[in-house]
Amino acid sequence: MSSYRVETAPSHGTVHSYLLLALLLAAALTAVGAPSFARTDVIADGMPCSLRARATAGDLLAAGRVQSPGDILATDGSVVSTGGGEPPSILRDGRTLTTDSLLRDGDVIETRRGADRVESLVTTTVIIPIPVRYDGSGPLATLATPGAVGVEERLVGELSGVVSTSTVVKAAMPMVVKRFKAPTSDKVVALTFDDGPWPAQTEQILDILKAERVKATFFVVGKQAYAYPRAMRRIVNEGHVVGNHTQGHLILDRVSPTAVRQQISDGQTAIFKTTGVRAKWFRPPGGHLSAAVGAETARHGLSLAMWSVDPQDWRQPNGGKLYAELVGTVKPGAIVLLHDGGGARAGTVWALPGVIRELKRQGYTFVTLDELMAKS
């Protein structure tokens, strides 16, 4: 009789142990959702990349494993916003994937840089400033025509402001300033002093003019008028003419029309408050004119005065050099630009008595701008 082995059935205790282990494993898998080792491995642009299970093309994008997005460009080709253009393309087998497309393990992915896009254009309207045109020559000026602003329409980049196209809807009309000199052959000369009043030296110049019995024209700065009201009263009381040289000596073709209006208006107010006189003359600092200056001086009824002789005493030359230049360049009807303010003017104070006496010896008479215009 052949022998055989009888298999023994597992005990109830062993079965229970297997079942408990299986239940615990199932619970663990349920809790974590998936084994931690489950990944999606792909090749992106020739480089291995490991992503989460059931990864999408969007996950590849978020991981930065793709080409860069495009830029936003201005119409001239310059970059307005780096990376603000179209997103990069993600391709599998030559087909473009959407961001929610599922990736498969072993996929070979190719990415391409996003396309650039040109910024949007918007239409803007721009005011064309009034140009200034001068007719004639000479130290005196009057406004012939006020001119008018123009209008231009522009297509500009919404972000960059770069102009794409522009069309003049209405051309600007020039402001015409007529320049002239006093039409007189009389040997007269007008001394003018700018930038005062100034401590001490304005008084010194007034003393010289009084001693020589000469009248002059003082173009004062408003803030200086408020600072030295005694000198302002003396200028007027001794028969000199006072003119407006703005409130703060700003270069008026470099500031806004509003600032021009304020500078001229406040200068007029300062002169009136310190002397009781309303100025009739205006000299722009540096001789710089603009359409706004022309319009504002016309509004105040101011005449424009430049100069025909400028020894540049503001550079503080020595008195001897200043004297030689003045007596050698003055001609009948001349308007001489000097300074009593704006800094030290020792050379001007030193040269002035000798200049006056020499020009008198040559037969010249000294006049104010009011008197010079009366001879025209």
Image (tube, rainbow, N blue to C red):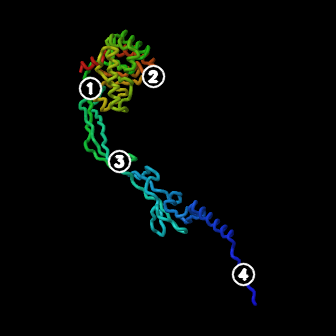
Residue matched to label 2: 316
Closer to the chain start, of discs 2 and 1, is 1
Above or below 39: residue 243: above
Closer to the chain start, of discs 1 and 4, is 4
Residue matched to label 1: 299
State how far apart marks 2 and 4 are (Cα).
131 Å
Outermost residue to the bottom: 1
Which percent across, then down, holds residue 58? 49, 60
Q: Amino acid at mark 2?
A: Gln
Q: Determine crowd level at label 1: few under 14, some 14-19, many 20+ residues with C-alpha closer than 10 A.
A: few
Look at the image and tell me in which quarter the N terminus lies.
bottom right
Which percent across, then down, holds residue 219? 35, 20
State how far apart marks 2 and 1 are (Cα).
36 Å
Outermost residue to the top: 211
Above or below 61: residue 372: above
* Residue under the image location 43 percent in, 58 percent down: 115
Q: 287 and 6: which one is in front?
A: 6
Q: Is residue 223 left or right of residue 91?
A: left
Residue matched to label 3: 156
Q: Which mark is residue 6?
A: 4
What SS does tag 1 mark?
helix
